[in-house]
Structure formats: structure tokens, C-alpha cells
Amino acid sequence: MSGPLTGYRVVDLTTMVSGPVATMMLADQGADVIKVEPPGGEYMRKTGVKHKGMPSGFLSCNRNKRSLSVDLKRPGGLEVVKKLVATADVLVHNFRPGAIERMGLGEDVVRSLQPKIIFVSISGFGEAGPYSKQRVYDPIIQAVSGLADIQRDRETGQPRMVRTIIPDKTTSVTAAQAITAALLHRERTGEGQHIRLSMLDTMIAFLWPEGMSGLNFVGNETDPARAQMGLDLVFETRDGHITAAAVADTEWAGLCRALNREELIADPRYKTPADRSRNQTERRKMITDELAKWESEEILQRLKREDVPCAPILDRWSILEDEQVLENKVIEIHDHPTLGQVRQPRPAVRFDRTPASVRTLAPYLGANNSEILSEAGYSDDEVERLESEGILYAQEV
């Protein structure tokens, strides 16, 4: 069975994470994604842990794609990509503003080759403004979007970064959704369009519903830190750490019973959600002190019997053997002729008619040069000439 985007072609000029993960999501759902890279490859091929010439980070951002390595600074290389664009439904790039035009692949050029194309520009800060030309990595957006403030240490006041690349990957999900929406619009109207998406805009919109809710009412703002719902719900037990959350009255009562502190159910400090919010510091200390008396497994079972949301805090190794992860078949093992067995998460979304799947692992650089050019109408002799002139490049494996 084919994925829901089977039949669509995406020319992927993106690098790092925000663009590659977006196009990988499209590829997981069946799109023919051609990843275009310069000789030597994009930066993610040059960093991180490698196994038999394949970087682990690149592997996890580029599955189900085909690789074309071509020198766009040479006229012959640019012509190759223009021929691909003429057959494409989507072009995605995440260069800084102005770079794609200098490369000779600005929207006007691309749309002259394929009028109905979905042209996608992903940037850090947007296409104008004081930060627009600045180099951007994930921590920069964490700093400017308010995420580092949301993560601020409650005791010291020190801002903190999230230790994974949240803005990049949130932008990926947003971009993939926007592309499919634009394709749906094109199916209905025949119109292509230009999608512009910045990491900054994405993160502010993503954080707003609870992280910024204190800023909603103009002239009646409240401290966003007090309004945000997210808490540091990490509790130490006698033998590890767990998380537990009691929001509804029934959950609070269940938590009190699980801790053998039934007298707190009717305590006026904690009787309603508003009471518990006003006294959250005191309540948090009480819960911390009580949970520290229990071993993890015992208290988790007691909390579950009371229908209190709770879970062990797993390290990354433990996730591989967690019973719910195994039940969901989240993590798959794939056989690769060079890499051996490779572990990857399956696409998260399950379509019952048009399943997404991991069909191929990330390609070595230039692995699909010949087949892609053949589809574009190049003869074997022309491909050999481009290779001999250094316009095409293929990684030796």
C-alpha cells in the first residue's frame, strides 16, 4: 500500500534539522523527496557519531529520501536542478534570506519552470527585520522566543535552555503541515503558492497557549510565569524518580489517598483547583516530601489504582524495553547492507488506508545520482561527463 503523498515530488535543498525533518515527514508519507547537496554534503554529514561513513544525526533526519550531489555553482549543476524543479510539486529551502536568489533558484526562476509549485522558505527570524540576516541555531531561537525564560530556574532565576532542539523540530512539523495544506489548496484550485515560515514565529505560536497566556488581555496582563501551567513535576523516590500530576479534584483526592494523607483532601488550602494553585509552593513541598518515603514501583502502583496520572522517569536505554513502547511498536530495527541493523522510530501517525513507513534509510551522498538524472532525461554518457567534470559527486562506501 502507498502512503498518502505518493506521487508528489519534493526537491529538498534544506540543511541541518528544521528543513530535513519536515521533508522526511513528507517522505515517510510516500512523497518522492530528492535531497540535493553540494559535493562533500551538507553540514549534518560532517558532524556527530559516524558508523561506516554515515553520521547518526543525518541518518535520523533523512530517511526515505534519494540523494543527488551536484555543484550548483557550476552552470551544468544548476541546469540539473532546474530540470528537477520542472517536474516537482514542492521546493523547500532553509537558506538565509537572499541566498536562494543568488544561487539562481529564486521563486521567479522556479515558478517560470513550474508555475504550480509550492515554494517553501524556512528561516530563523523571517525575511526582514534587524535579525533576519543573522546566522541561527536552535538555542538562539530558544533565547529570543521566550522558551529559555519559561525554563527559568524557579529558585535561582537563571534562564535555561531545553537540552534538545525544540524550535528546529517544531518548525519541521509546522512546515510539513503547511506543505500538505498548500497541496490540498492546489488540488482544489490549481494554484501554487509561496510558504514563508520562521523558527521565531513558530516558537512564539507554539509556546503561547499556556506559556504566554498571562499576556492575552491587553491592559490586564498578569505575570506569564504565574499563568503558565507547566511545572517541574520531577519527584525523587527512595530508589529513583517519578512524575505525577493531580489537577482535577478526583486526582487530588486519589493522590492524597495513595500517600496515606487523606486528611489533606478537605484541607482548605487544597480543596479546589484555585486553592491548590494559590498554594502551589507549599503543596509541591508536601508532595515532594511524601513521595521521597516510597520506592518507585510501589507508589506508582498505588497512584495508578487511584487513577492519578503518573509514570516512571525513564532513561533513554530503558525506553527500548518499556512495555508501552513495545506494545505500540514505536521503534523498528531495519537491516542495511552496509550499516547492519539500524534502529529508528516508525512514523508516529498511523493511516489505516495509506500507511506511512520507513522504506529506506538515509542515503549515502550521491547514491541516487544516476537514476535521478536518468529520470530527468540525461543519457548515460551525459551523466558520465558530469561526473568527470566534477559537477556530480558520489560518496565511496
Image (cartoon, rainbow, N blue to C red):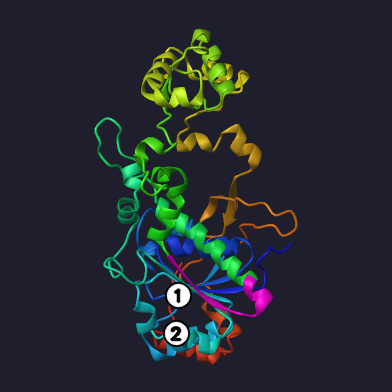
- Mark 2 or mark 1: name the one nearer the start of the chain: 2
Q: On the image, numbered disc 2 is attached to which residue?
A: 387
Q: Is residue 171 above or below residue 148?
A: below
- From this viewpoint, is residue 51 visible? no
- From this viewpoint, is residue 269 visible? yes
Residue at x-position 56% and y-position 85%? 114
Q: Are marks 2 and 1 in contact (CB under 8 Å)?
A: yes
Residue 176 is drawn in which quadrant?
A: bottom right
Residue 51 is drawn in which quadrant?
A: bottom left
Residue at x-position 47% and y-position 46%? 209
Q: On the image, numbered disc 1 is attached to which residue?
A: 394
| Side of 292 relative to 154 (left or right) | right
| Side of 153 relative to 335 (left or right) | left
Whether residue 188 appears in magenta in the rendering, the answer is yes
Residue at x-position 29% and y-position 70%? 133
Residue at x-position 50% and y-position 18%? 271
Q: Residue 329: which numbered mark, if any? A: none
Q: What amino acid does circle 2 point to?
A: Glu
